[in-house]
């Protein structure tokens, strides 16, 4: 009878431990699955971040090119305007000097 009681106690403990083992196996299976999912998500996020950075780099370089082209066009137009205004000043200044020299030459002739 004493042996029978020990067997029953041992079987009861064994069933309780088997139930606990099953619960722990399920828990750790979920933990492992969660870790695997987390690693997969981190890999996807890393890949996405790299693609976004590459795309941003391409956009930045394109923006710099556009800005450089615009600055070049703008500077060329400014230089062209400056050259045209210098030519106009030379023409105006040249006309005045020619007309004033003609006047002085005519005045010199009259004075003689």
Image (cartoon, helix red, strand yellow):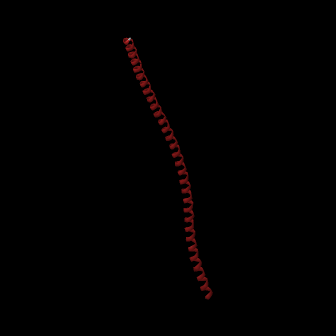
Q: Position of residue 9 (x, y in %)?
A: 58, 83
Seen at 37% across and 12% down, the residue is 111
Q: Residue furthest bottom?
A: 1
Foreground: 102 or 90? 102
The residue sitting at 56% across, 70% down in the picture is 24
* Left/right of residue 104 with respect to residue 24 in the rendered view: left
Q: Residue at x 61, y 85 (%)?
A: 6
To which quarter of the image does residue 27 belong?
Answer: bottom right
Q: Residue at x 54, y 62 (%)?
A: 34
Tell me the quarter of the image containing the N terminus. bottom right
Question: Residue 26 versus residue 61: which sits nearer the camera?
Answer: 61
- Does 107 appear above or below 72? above
Q: Of residues 61 and 96, which is closer to you in this image?
A: 96
- Give the image location of residue 80, x and y in percent: 46, 29
Position above or below: 13 against 56: below
Q: Position of residue 12 (x, y in %)?
A: 57, 80
- Quarter holding the C terminus is top left
């Amino acid at each position: 009878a004493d042996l029978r009681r020990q067997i029953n106690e041992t079987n009861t403990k064994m069933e309780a431990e088997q139930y606990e083992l099953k619960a722990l196996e399920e828990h750790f299976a979920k933990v492992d699955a969660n870790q695997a999912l987390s690693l997969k998500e981190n890999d996807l996020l890393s890949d996405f971040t790299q693609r976004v950075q590459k795309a941003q780099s391409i956009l930045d370089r394109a923006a710099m090119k556009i800005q450089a082209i615009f600055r070049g066009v703008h500077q060329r137009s400014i230089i062209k305007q400056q050259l045209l205004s210098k030519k106009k000043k030379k023409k105006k200044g040249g006309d005045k000097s020619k007309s004033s020299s003609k006047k002085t030459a005519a005045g010199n002739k009259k004075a003689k």
